[in-house]
Amino acid sequence: VSINYDKNFIKKLFRTKLKKKLAAMESERKALKNKGGVFALTAICALIMAIVNPNLFFSLNFANLDPQDFFVLIGLIWVALFIYFMVQYNKYRKKFKHQIIKEVIQAVLPGSTYTPDGYVPRSDYQKSSFFLTSENRFGGEDLITHQYKGINYQFSELTTKKVTGSGKNKSTKIIFRGIFLTCELPYKIKYRTLILPDLGEKMFGRMIGKFFQSKNITRDELVKLEDVDFEKNFVVYSKDQIEARKILTPRMMAKILDYDKKTNHTIHLCFEPGKLYMAIPMRKNYFEPNLTSGIKYKDIRDVCDIIHTITSIIDVLEIENTPEK
Amino acid sequence: MSPIIIIIAALVAFSFLVFIFIFNSIKGKRNEIENATGGIDTYLKQRYDLIPNLVQAVKKYMEHEKSLLENVTKLRTQAMSANPKSDDIAQINNEISKMLGGIMVSVENYPDLKSNTNFIDLQKTLKEVEENIAASRRYYNSAVTDFNNSLDMFPSNIVAAMMGMKRRAVFEAPEHEKKNVNLKELF
């Protein structure tokens, strides 16, 4: 099963299939955009009024109602209309994902399955051990499952958080937001090899950064590699120095570095016995409808680009070429 | 006790702690070299054990490469009887690598041999062992570089001199391996 990633193919897909579907959804989008605008505007006006002159709220008299009751009533109507708007928006969003995103994904990744509400299992996220802070909120969407060159893999958007305290003391820390990939690994490996962005070296310089990394008791042994560029960008931990170097051959390091530069995001990789995990933190949500300006060719192209970026890791790491398969 | 004495005592205690820390760190680095050397030896031993099986499997087919097979067997015997710490051993192992590479290239001329299951298994194991040797040599080089750096840098160089530590040589890839780098695949 191949990956269809070609500029002309995507253009043709947009012209022949997506444009019509998007046009049919256009009136719905515009109506939602206007409603959303009204809600945003009324909310902003109310907020400004409350800040500038709170007494104004209570000086108004409408239909002989008590000013407080009047504003409670207005508030309730506003909330009810907002809920109605959100229901409409979710319907549109669902339609967009089923009709547009699904079409794009199945065209780019033939034979794939797309679950808009699905996400990679929490156990995979935890096994990767990319992030030391333990999460107590875990969620995601847009799960894509596919087989490429005989390798089964899946990826989705994930958001993990740690929420502490309650009420006024409540604080939320986002641990990870981005795309998480889990892929079967036919390598015969015994231990985990973790490749993380080298924040220590960037913050404290090579010598001090390496010193702290080598003393990091929360991770396995630090693996110092000979590729200076790779070392500047990544830090590698493993229980087995030789196995880590078997995975990270000089050629592989060059390829991962090149991949990291091309993605424009900081990649995290974890080789586990039987599994490969990759996390790419990113803020942009690529699989959502754009209410303000509608979906253009460039947005579809961006979706294809991100799918290609994620799936190309299988080519980069040459997972299918392992003799031990 | 006067403050000066307290300061001097604190400085001496601090220097002593730093000394212990550097001393242990250098010892740790030296042990890492030993560990890496052990890794290389293990995989070289695996390769020595594999050679007779390989020669046995291919000699029926490779009549024209008889001398190559004899040489690799001879080198194996030399390597096994040589002192593992001698300078010659690296040269012998490089020669073995070169010859095994030669055998694998010659196999291309023997389609029957190429499809032989026993040979395919041996080839796979040999490739794995070669990969392990390459990885353990890289580990060794990394450990030696780390150790040599602590012998060159201040203040660890003072402690290392007191300990009588000497620089170690890194493993250099043989010329034929350097030539085989495929730049096209890298860029």
Image (cartoon, rainbow, N blue to C red):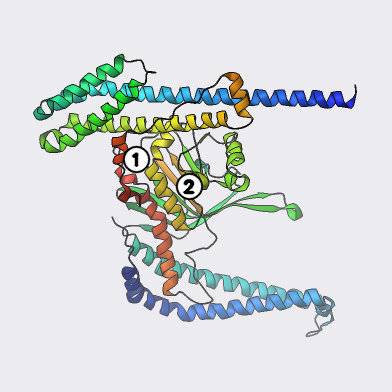
Q: Specify whether B170 is left or right of B120.
A: right
Residue in front for this viewpoint, A34 or B41: B41
**Residue B86 in sight from this viewpoint:** yes
Q: Residue at x 69, y 75 (%)?
A: A43
Residue in front for this viewpoint, A312 or A166: A312
User: How busy is the neighbourhood of tag 1: few (under 14 within 10 Å), some, or many (20 plus)?
Assistant: some
User: Percent x, y for residue A313?
Assistant: 39, 51
Q: Which residue is mark 1?
A: A186
Indicate which label's residue lies in the foreground, 2 or 1.
Answer: 2
Q: Is residue A313 above or below residue B31?
A: below
Residue at the extreme bottom of the image, as rendered: A63
Screen quadrant of the N terminus of chain B: top right
Q: Is residue A232 above or below residue A39?
A: above
- Which circle marks residue A229 in the picture? 2
Quadrant of res B141: top left
Q: Is residue A2 above or below residue B110?
A: below
Indicate the amino acid at tag 2. Asp
